[in-house]
Amino acid sequence: MKSLRTFLALPVLPSYYHQLSTKVLHEFVPKLRCLTVLSLAGYCFDELPSSIGALKHLRYLNLSYSEITMLPESSSKLFNLQTLKLCGCRKLTKLPTGISNLINLMHLDISDTDSMQEMPPHMGNLTNLHSFSKFIVGEGHGRGIMELMKLSHLRGELRITGLHNVANVRDSELVNLKEKQNIDALALEWIGNFHGVRNLRDELQVLNSLQPHQNLHKLSVKFYGGTIFPLWIGDPKFINMMHLELCNCPKITFLPPVGQLPLLKKLSILGMDGVKEVGIEFYGVRSSSAKAFPSLKTLTIKNMVEWEQWSSEELQQIFINLRELRMRNCPKLVGKLPRFLPSLENLDICDCPQLVELPEILPSVCKLKVEKCQEMFLEVCVI
């Protein structure tokens, strides 16, 4: 057993967490000095023994969906480690201070670790990283957004939070996301508190400087405090963009012209408190005969508390492939929805009490759900 190279603790029961004997962690695993692969994913334990640092040959460590709160500092001595998976460790508060020493690390998954509030310093030393699911912009030396500058091999999904901590707009420019062409999903997030001092002009410049490569498939922007979006959001040159989410940006007064993104299939717009009207600018067209949202399948609009008008009557070819429309909590919306939705199959409207008319032509609808609207629409219908 001392020569064992792979130890995968597979769950034996179909439940979320599985109990793991302390003897396995503190007595059995530390003796397996030849281990290269160790997975304890899905097991219920909240700490690793410091003896984990003695597993010098370890290349793959998976602790996902455990209740671990932190890793021992000795894990910073696992110099051969290439993959560290901590996905779904919701109680994890921090990474080891010395994790930047693991220069062979190629994959670091810390997605769904909402208790983690900061990064260790000098994450930019991990220049071999290919996948890095989340980076939290911090304050102080070695914790700023410039740590991403040297991570030129990043690919897949990247979530950048804490953008309110960017002290110098020039720092975000130097990250140069445009050159990181293998990132296909990007999330950009500020703090959700809008009551403190926020520099709206700086936030616009930061978001503008974080323009990604045009290979991007998915973009999410949350808690942005600017009054307008930069021009690259909605630019039809993003020919691969399929999923766009704009969430809780209360200072925005007009939606960006995203209707000309040729492959956009899913669009979510939530919490745009400053938007009162959605007009022709949203579609990005210059004539009434031009197409808008040619590939869109799902449109979700929620918590638009000041939205009053949705103008689309003059346009002839919009939402021609839309399959699902969901609208929630738009209390001031009056007037009409787009009149002709030829491909719509699922229409779900809730908490839109001023809305009095459904689209006139719905030839494909098979599910209609209307709640907390005008009395004439309160009935839930399944056609």
Image (cartoon, rainbow, N blue to C red):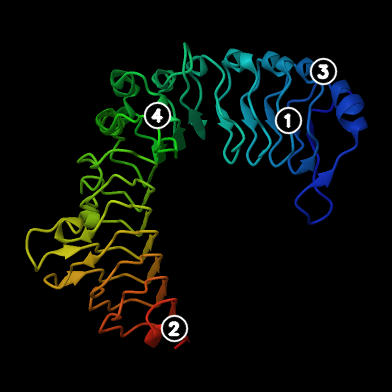
Q: Nearer the viewer, residue 186 or 272?
A: 272
Front of the two marks 1 and 2: 2
Amino acid type of the residue that numbered disc 2 sits on in the rendered structure: Leu
Identify residue type, mark 4: His
The local crowd at label 2, few if under 14, some if 14 to 19, many if 20 or more residues have their Cα within 10 Å, is: some
Which quadrant, please, contains the N terminus? top right
Query: Is 199 in front, or is 230?
Result: 199
| Number of other residues with Cα within 10 Å of mark 1, as a class: few under 14, some 14 to 19, many 20 or more | some
Q: Tell me what residue is drawn at x 64 percent, y 42 percent.
A: 88
Marks 3/2: CA distance? 62 Å
Disc 3 versus disc 2: nearer the observer: 2
Horizontal side, residue 303 vs residue 237: left or right = right
Disc 3 target residue: 51
Read off the residue under disc 4.
164
> What residue is rendered at 38% in x and 23% in y?
166
Q: Look at the picture and state if 27 lies above or below 312.
A: above
Identify the residue under disc 2.
378
- Badge 4 crowding class, 10 Å Cα cut-off, few under 14, some 14 to 19, many 20 or more, is many
**x then y, percent, for residue 204:** 26, 33
User: Residue 310 or 153: which is nearer the viewer?
Assistant: 310
